[in-house]
Image (cartoon, rainbow, N blue to C red):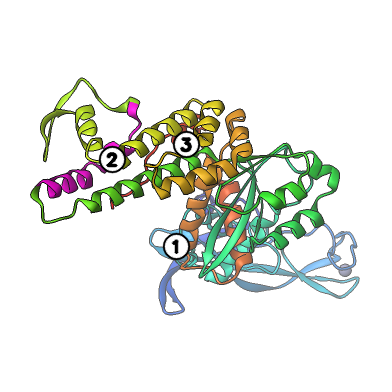
Amino acid sequence: MSYSNSIKSLIDIQDPNITFDEDCVKAGTFKGKACKYISGTLTYSPTHCVNCGVENTNFTIYKNGTQLSRITLPFTGVNPTYLLLKKQRFLCKKCNNSFTAKTPIVEQNCYISKNVKAQVMIKSAEAQSLKSISKDCSVSPTTVQRVINEGAKQFKPYHAKLPKHLSFDEFKYAKGAMAFEYINVLNGDILDILDRRDSFAIKNHFMVNYSLTDRQNVETVTIDMNAGYVNVIKELFPNAKIIIDRFHLVQLINRSMNKCRVHVMNQFRTSNNEDLKKYRRLKRYWKLILKKASELSSVEYKYYPLFGQRLEISILEEMLAYDPVLKANYELYQILLKAMETKDFQLLASSLENPVQPFISNYMKTSLKTLKKHLPYIQNSFGYPYNNGRIEGMNNKIKVLNRVAYGYRNFDHYKKRIILHFKLKPFETDFKKTEQKSHAPKQCKAA
Ligand SMILES: [Zn+2]
């Protein structure tokens, strides 16, 4: 391989019209920073004039001077690297106009090589700030955003057709501002992101972008229980079944159970030593009370501080015996958990229907009310395999992107970054995994 070819291979330039001399690499500075300059020449014999189109025969077009451009390349070693390209100028005898030689390594009127742009795209898919990408690729943060915007164009939401199964969610993106996003629940494709999540904005978006026939074809929409989308969905998608994400159901009763425990626990915070012992135990072993009864060990003796050598199940029973309210709520909580785990709708409905016992705490009563209100949608969640696990995982990544950027002031830029991120790095979730997650009662913190 010649010297020139070795340089080209090193900086990934394939254009055969560019050549390098020996000693073409020189150290220098650019804007006060150390850098490397590689000098090259671009020349060829044009087939025709770019201005008038005349064919280049008998020297109609002749070489006429050169023009020097500085093109940003990806780093070589530790320094920013620039290509000082001497471009051939041509003059056409027929039209008397001149033009400059072209190369595919940069776009026209651009001084950043396509390789640098590709590098920016790859890095922008990672959770990196614009500033750090800009440093790594020796271009300005504005250029980074411009490259992201250009790249996101090809993935622009096109609202062609709605999938049959949608998933709605929202995320916070600035102080007090919430954005709304909807995805295809089956493959995780982000369909669009709106900078507002009020009913008016959502209704308007779907009415403007999709036909009624299209909206009628939507079969299910999965949402969180706390989101107020029910009415909007009924209006927009007349045939869709609303599915409430099961994970949130479990979370709801999980929280009420925990609040009930804290309430009972605080009653034991007295000067009485016996009471204080109960208080400490209820405080320390909060997890056991939230755990699924079927997962408690009844065979393994272990040492528990505050209890001694005991079985998990016997510790739990002792704690429940401290207070009838705790016990009653625990029993109801376990029935609800079981109904959700086994997707037993009859069991769930009947445990909500039963006249509420005097011992049931107000926290639990509120949750029961909420569950009752959403009962038809909960039934749907038992019948379909869809949940919001995927969209919520995506939201976590979106928040990371926002954090590394120290908050985006321009929502449109943020949206493009998000779309690029997920198109270049599709979010993988195992449906089975999120299924399990939606069953597991955890999440609660000790009070
Ligand atoms: Zn010409």
- Residue at (80, 55) in percent of width and height: 207
Q: Judge by depth and name the residue closer to the eye, 414 or 295.
A: 295
The answer to whether residue 179 is magenta is no
- Magenta-colored stretch includes residue 290: yes
Residue at left 44%, top 64%? 132
Residue 287 — which label? 2
Q: Residues within 10 Å of mark 3 (few under 14, many from 20)?
A: many
Which residue position is annotated with label 3? 438
Q: Secondary structure at mark 3?
A: loop
Residue 400 vertical position relative to residue 290 in the rendered view, above or below = below
SS of the residue at dot 1? helix
The earlier-in-sequence mark between 1 and 2 is 2
Asked if the residues shown at circle 1 and circle 2 are in contact, with their CB atoms under 8 angstroms apart, the answer is no
Of circles 1 and 2, the one toward us is 2
Q: Name the kind of residue labelled 2 in the image.
A: Lys
Label 1–label 3 contact, CB within 8 A: no
Q: Label 3 amino acid?
A: Ser
Give how far across and how far down residue 25 sits, in percent.
Answer: 46, 64
Residue 31 image position (x, y, % from top left): 46, 79
Say whether residue 32 is left or right of residue 200.
left
- Any part of residue 7 in sight: no
